Image: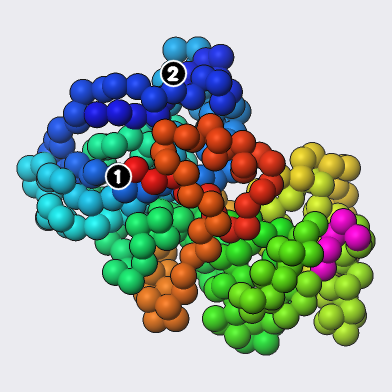
Amino acid sequence: MRALNVAAPWGLDALKVVELPDPKPGRGEVLVRMKAVSLNYRDLLMVNGMYGRGSASTTDVITPFSDGCGVVEAVGEGVTRFKPGDRVATMFFQGWISGPPTLEKAMTALGFPIPGAGAELQTFSQEGLSKVPEFLTDQEVATLPCAALTAWRALFEDAKLQPGDTVVLQGTGGVSIFGLQFAHAAGYRTLITSSSDEKLERARGLGADHLVNYRQTPDWSKPVREATGGRGADFIMEVGGGGTIEQSMRAVRIAGHIAIIGVVAGAGEGFNPAALIGNAAKLQGVFVGSRDMFEAMCKAIELHRIRPVVDKVYPWTEARAAFAAMAGGEHFGKIVLEF
C-alpha cells in the first residue's frame, strides 16, 4: 500500500508518498481502507515540524491526518463494534471515549504521536472509530472529527447558550463554518467576520445574520456591539489567537464566553488579563472532543440534515497542493483529499 510520510527537515517538500507493507489488524484493531481525509491547520503545523505535545525528533517519521472516512476491510480478534463493510470516521483522539479531557487522553491524537489516516490502508483501535450518518458523502464525513467536533464542543458542551443568543464566528475556515451551521440550527443569532465580501455572502447563504469585513473594519468589535444594542456577544469563536483576542474581549458581553480554537492570526500584542476581571468573561481553550461528543453531534447532523461545506478536493497524492491552498487562505469551509 501507499502512504504519506513526512520527516526532518520537515516542510511541504519533505512530504512524500511511500510504499509500505499492508498492515494487519491485531487484537481489538480494525483495518480501514481510507476513502477521504480532510485538512486542518494542525496538519499544516505538523508537516512543518511545529506541532505536538512531545516534540518531533529528527528520527520521527509522521503519517499525517487525524480526520478520515473509510470502509472497514477486516477486523482483528475481539472486535465487536464493527464488521467488514461498515463505513467509519476516525476519531481525533483515539483514547478519549467519554468524560473530561486528561493528559492521557490527549496523548492519543492521530498523526502524532499515533500514525494518522494519510494512507490507503490503516489500522485503528475499535474504540477510536465511529459509524457515521449515511446521507453524507465520504468527503463530507472526513470533515467531521476535528473541525466539526471542535465547533460542537465549544457551542454545546462548554458554553451555556440559549436560543436567540448572539454567536460570533471569526473567519470562514472549517471550524467557523461548522460553528455557523450549528448555531443557525440551534436558533442563535450569528455574526461572521471575513476579509472577503464574496465569502461573507456565501456565509449569508448558510444562515449568517450579520456580516463584517474585518479588513475594511479592523475594529470589528464595534459592529458586534451595534448588532447587540451595546450588550456584546454571548459567545465568540476565537480562531485568531493573539492577533484577534483584544477585539474579542471588546466584543464579548459581561460574563460572556470566548472559545479559544486557534492562533491563525499569530501572536499579536500582549494581552492584559485584567480585562477579564472587568467583564467577568470566560476564556476556554478547546481541543476537539470525545467519541461520545462526536456521536451526539452526528445525531444532530442527521436530524437537521446539515451538510459540511467541502470547498476544494484534491487527489491524496497531491497533498502538497492542498496544503498550499490552505496556507494561502483560499478555502471556504474544508479542503479534502480523496483516495
Question: Does the magenta segment cover residue 214?
Answer: yes
For this rendering, which residue is in front, 321 or 232? Answer: 321
Q: Position of residue 252 (x, y in %)?
A: 80, 69
Give the SS element for disc 1: strand
Question: Does the magenta segment cover residue 30?
Answer: no
Q: Which mark is residue 60?
A: 2
Quarter of the image for residue 55 reads: top right
Question: Residue 191, can we see it?
Answer: yes
In the rendered view, does 254 fall on the left or right side of 103? right
Q: Nearer the viewer, mark 2 or mark 1?
A: 1
In the rendered view, does 73 fall on the left or right side of 62? left
Q: Which residue is mark 1?
A: 34
Q: Position of residue 253 (x, y in %)?
A: 81, 73
Give, as a three-letter code, the residue at label 2.
Asp
Which residue is depicted at the point 42% across and 33% down? Answer: 317
Q: Magenta segment range?
A: 212-216
Q: Is residue 287 above or below residue 302?
A: above
Circle 1 residues within 10 Å: few <14, some 14–19, many ≥20: many
In the rendered view, does 102 fall on the left or right side of 272? left
Which residue is depicted at the point 84% across and 80% down? Answer: 227
Give, as a three-letter code, the residue at label 1.
Met
The mark nearer the N terminus, 2 or 1, is: 1
Quarter of the image for residue 191 reads: bottom right
Quarter of the picture containing the C terminus is top left
Give the SS element for disc 2: loop
Q: Is residue 238 above or below residue 120?
A: below
Q: Say whether marks 2 and 1 touch (CB < 8 Å).
A: no
In the rendered view, does 186 fall on the left or right side of 139? right
